[in-house]
Amino acid sequence: PSLQDIWDLNDMQIAAKNVLSGKDYAYYRTGSLNEYTYQANLGIYSKIKINGFGFRDVSNLQTSTTILGYNFSYPFFIAPAAKAGRANKSAEASLASAAGKSGILYVPSISSTLSIEKIAQAGVEGQVMFHQEYIWANTSQVIDELDRIKAAGFKAIFLTVDNTGINGIRTRSMRYTTDSDMRTSHAANFDLDSLAAFRNLTDLPIVPKGIKTWQDALACLHLGFPAIYVSNHGGRVLDGVPTSVEILLDIRKHAPEVFEGMEVYADGGVRRGTDALILLALGARAVGLGRPPMFANIWGEEGVLRLIDLFGQEMKTSMQLMGVSNVNKLNSSYVSSVSFVVV
Ligand code: FNR
């Protein structure tokens, strides 16, 4: 399908389903077990009411923000997702260049198709990228990768801590493969001391990714991390865990100091500009897109540029209709009437 016929992120997913092999589409699309969390991620945004205020000057919309002190054109970013090469030969290179040309953040996965160095080279002049890392059981592998990430110019590490020792059981994807997704080489003994000590392995700032409880968020605050990344890994790890909306609400209720003391990023099921605005209103500073850029990449860089443009337009239009002119002015007054009880 031509990009001219693509009007939103859902169109991109449908196109990808038609173009990719069953195996590659399943790899991107799958959640774990019953996919309750995967489905909840998509559905949760319909449970939140967005307040649209009139009588406000929205003639000058401001979407730019800082993430860990670096400037970006939008408060949404391309989240780490493994193996972009399953959708396009250009793999992560088109994600890096499209992000750079649009001024948004890209955080490549450590399980990418291309090498750390190749992805760095695909960026545009002056582009700031962060890099994802896993808690591999093999510490010398971690140290080697962190050194390469730093040398290649990446400015921070998103350290994914949600699949300690093991991955989720992803039936939809496993049906296509004999090498089980479950056999991973992640450290199963990674505790809070390990998290604190991980910072000795690099001088890049570390952002724990995959925070799913207010208790873990608070622990990261107490350890002095500059940011956390609330995420259930797109519903691919532990099925049944809450969505980022619910986790943010829990942190607001039990540990509101987290939002004062550190930056909070979030992702999961974000497919509309309004979804991102809800997470920002609940306290996220920036919001990640996981699957959508992978699907957009069936057209390579052009597809990813179109995704960023469409998503940015949805965000700007909705901000204008909400009566908020600056993404950094979003707060809980813009959302209400949560139609379920969070205890
Ligand atoms: C991921 N995700 C992920 N996260 C991570 O930290 N390292 C990784 O290598 C991967 N790999 C990966 C592959 C694929 C195919 C998907 C779909 C996801 C999780 C990702 O960063 C993000 O948390 C979720 O994808 C967000 O949910 P949505 O936007 O896909 O609904």
Image: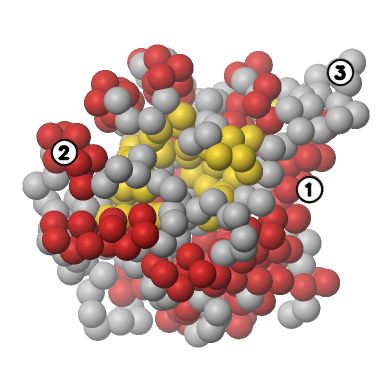
Q: Indicate which label's residue lies in the foreground, 1 or 2.
A: 2
Q: Is residue 21 above or below residue 252?
A: below
Whether ligand 1 has any atom under 8 Å from the Cβ at mark 2 is answered as: no
Residue 280 left/right relative to 199: right
Residue shown at 53%/25% (left/top)? 283
- Mark number, residue 292: none
Kind of residue sitting beneath label 3: Arg
Quadrant for the N terminus in the image: bottom right
Taking depth in this image into account, of 260 and 313 the one nearest to the observer is 260
Q: How many neighbours does mark 3 have within 10 angstroms: few (below 14), some (14-19), or many (20 or more)? A: few
Q: CA distance from mark 3 to mark 1?
A: 20 Å
Residue shown at 18%/69% (left/top)? 183
- Mark number, residue 56: 3
Displayed quadrant of residue 211: top left
Q: Are marks 2 and 3 in contact (CB under 8 Å)?
A: no
Taking depth in this image into account, of 135 and 253 the one nearest to the observer is 135
Where is residue 157 drawn, in percent x and y? 37, 48
Q: CA distance from mark 1 to mark 2?
A: 42 Å
Residue shown at 55%/26% (left/top)? 282
Where is residue 326 drawn, in percent x and y? 73, 28
Quadrant for the C terminus in the image: top left
Kind of residue sitting beneath label 2: Ala
Q: Is residue 111 above or below residue 80?
A: below
Kind of residue sitting beneath label 1: Gln
Q: Indicate which label's residue lies in the foreground, 2 or 3.
A: 2
- Mark number, residue 197: 2
Q: Provide the residue designation for mark 1.
A: 313
Mark 2 or mark 3: whose residue is earlier in sequence: 3
Mark 3 or mark 1: whose residue is earlier in sequence: 3
Colouring rule applied to residues: secondary structure
